Amino acid sequence: QPKLTLAYDADTRFSQRIRSQTEVLKDLVAYLKQHPAKGQHPRLTPIHATTFEAKPEDPEWEAARREFLKQIPIDPPSLDQPGTADRPRGYIDVRSYNDQRLETYLQELKSNGLADKIGVVSLGDEIGLPRPPAGDHEAFRDWLKRQGVSPADVVPAAGNDWSRVEYSAESQLKNSDPRRFYYSRRYEHAFGIQAMKRRTDLLRRYLPNAGIGANFSPHHGPMYLGEAHKWIDIFRQDGMTMPWSEDYIWQVPVGTQQMNFISLDMFRAAVVDRPKAKIHYYVMTHTPGQTTDNWRRQFFGDLAHGMQIVNLFEFRPVQAAYTENHCSDPAMYVAVRDAFRELQRFEDIVQAGRVRPGMAALLCGETGDIWGDNEAPFGAAKRAAYIAARHAQIPLDIVTEADLASPRMKNYRVLLLADRHVSRAASKAISDWVQSGGRLAASAGAGMWDEFGEPNMTLPAAFGIEHKALDLPANSQVTMIKQDLPFAISMDEVSVEEDGKRAVIGQVFGAKARFHVTDGTAETLASFKDGSPACVMRSIGQGVAGYAGFLPGFSYFQPAIPKLPVDRGATADSMCHLLPTEFNDKALEMFQATTLGIDLPVECSEHLVENTVIESPQGVAIPLVNWRPEPIEKLTITTRIKLPKGKPTLASGRSVKELESNSGERRFELDLDVADVLIFRP
């Protein structure tokens, strides 16, 4: 006889029941059948999850499990369903293998005919990269020589004496020995990438179809602002081949769940030249915790920003789960199943396509990472600026310092700069890009220092200013917007002249830059209370450089966040699930001004509907995610890109109406609930 596994609800006094584990599964299947779904299951998209385990000795359990998997077919994170070489579904975790054992294991997989059927290799969960051992001086010197760096570049008094150059990446060297600190940190990054690459190279020799990666936690360090070397460079240098992270954001009061997409945009930058690489992402169904509507926003938003491998992580209720990340609300299973069937209607576009490149870019630089430029308040302000740009409907990509001098920058009309430290080479590249027609928009302190912590000589000159000081009062600091911004004290206010009067456009939080305008061609656009410049703009060559001496993202968010304590509720009316909507429109206009005269590729009549474009030979998909809590009727979408001529459809199956359009445009009208996808085929 099989064992009877009893399953308790969290509060049996409330539920008044104790069930067997089999009854829990059968009840869930019955609930799914009570809410029938339309459409077909996805066939092209790898969908992984840990769910109800097989119990061959228990026929009743196995029958219920088969019924569950008919409702929501998923690929377990194992070799149980390896798929084929054309559609590999095998999934292995090799974190516990040393190199010798790993090669033996890989040889066994090859001998058993499984090597070409493995699609996912996990190197670990929430990992960091290896670091050099203390006293790794010789290897550090060898690396510096390969970079063309001289001893005097690291230690100015060293002349040509390499023995005076020693590796040390300790933070306390920032002030006392900034050059050694900077180069040691860069070496540390390079060391970590190469250490991972050696393992990845071994795996690639045996597993030709596998994506190789590890889940990067967005919660380490400045949340949802990963370090460029780890989130981008390691993939560009083949240290790993499959970017992988998670959208576990609802319990983190960063500001809005929409900020999760920064991680995906960093990954898109990582694989921009890797057309076969796929982004693997956990779309967390954890309930109680996530809500069904916000899960749908995350799922379609993750697809919109590049996800091609879906992972639900722990997809079973608490009575059967292994971790605390269980999914215990039957309604979530219905939401997941229905969203998957909608995905089936455009998954060929997702799998064969790529997100259309942006027209604007946000710099995430290694130099800024080294100097901690994403620490409070600047990281929170950077996330806020990202959201403001998306609310201005600007298609946005992430770029690194290496990109700034590359042909890729010709694609961008606007560059957003929030990093205080920008290397000398990158600063020159930015200045040259502006000269050739780019539009630079920088916030308080951005670009005021170089890679050695010394005053930046290039970017302040581009703005036509002289930097004096950066004020950071303790009572105005913001680490996480929902948690801190409502209680921060305004440092100042920013105003502009309208009809001969001063009109306040926003409050100042977190940081305030004091600077002088030194170039007569620089125009003061806004001022602080005392009349000193708050925002200036200067034409350079064919382009424009603008500098705001405050953090506009905070000014944008400030009226949208109620003054309430943060909670960890699991309902739509909880603070952690609050969708901010009452933003500062005057601050938004600052972001919209960066694109004046530029036609947006897609524009929605409601700016809190996020849109992106996925292009492929099979067609075009335009995901639409509604960041308002209520549905929108008669949403109008204007497109100014080449689209297939076929009649558009919606993933939800709802109706869409094509409106009369001007030359070069197509306009559509539809009703939008939480999220949907506009699909175009030849």
Image (cartoon, helix red, strand yellow):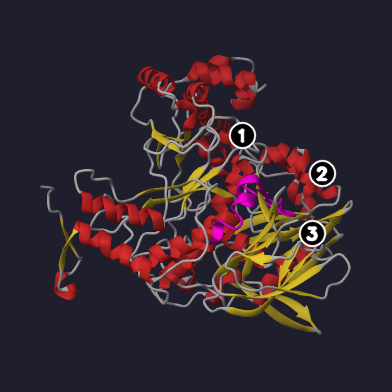
Residue 516 image position (x, y, % from top left): 74, 60
| Residue displayed at 44% across by 61% down | 336
Q: Which label was assigned to residue 167? A: none
Residue 642 image position (x, y, % from top left): 80, 57
Q: Determine whether, in the image, residue 203 is placed left or right of residue 590.
A: left
Q: Quadrant of residue 471?
A: bottom right
Q: Label 1 belongs to which residue?
A: 236
Residue 423: in sight, yes or no? no
Mark 2 or mark 3, earlier in chain = 2
Residue 656: in sight, yes or no? yes
* Disc 1 versus disc 2: nearer the observer: 1
Q: Is residue 284 magenta?
A: no
Q: Quadrant of residue 402?
A: top right
Q: Which residues are magenta?
A: 342-365
Query: Which amino acid lies under the numbered mark 2 shown in the image of this protein?
Result: Asp
Q: Are marks 1 and 2 in contact (CB under 8 Å)?
A: no
Q: Name the secondary structure under disc 1.
A: helix
Mark 3 is surrounded, within 10 Å at the Cα level, by few (under 14), some (14 to 19) or many (20 or more) other residues, namely some
Q: Name the secondary structure under disc 2.
A: helix
| Residue displayed at 72% across by 55% down | 360
Q: Label 3 belongs to which residue?
A: 641
Q: Label 2 belongs to which residue?
A: 432
| Residue displayed at 55% across by 28% down | 190
Q: Is residue 360 magenta?
A: yes
Query: Which amino acid lies under the numbered mark 3 shown in the image of this protein?
Result: Ile
Q: Spatial distance from mark 2 to mark 3, Cα to Cα?
A: 29 Å
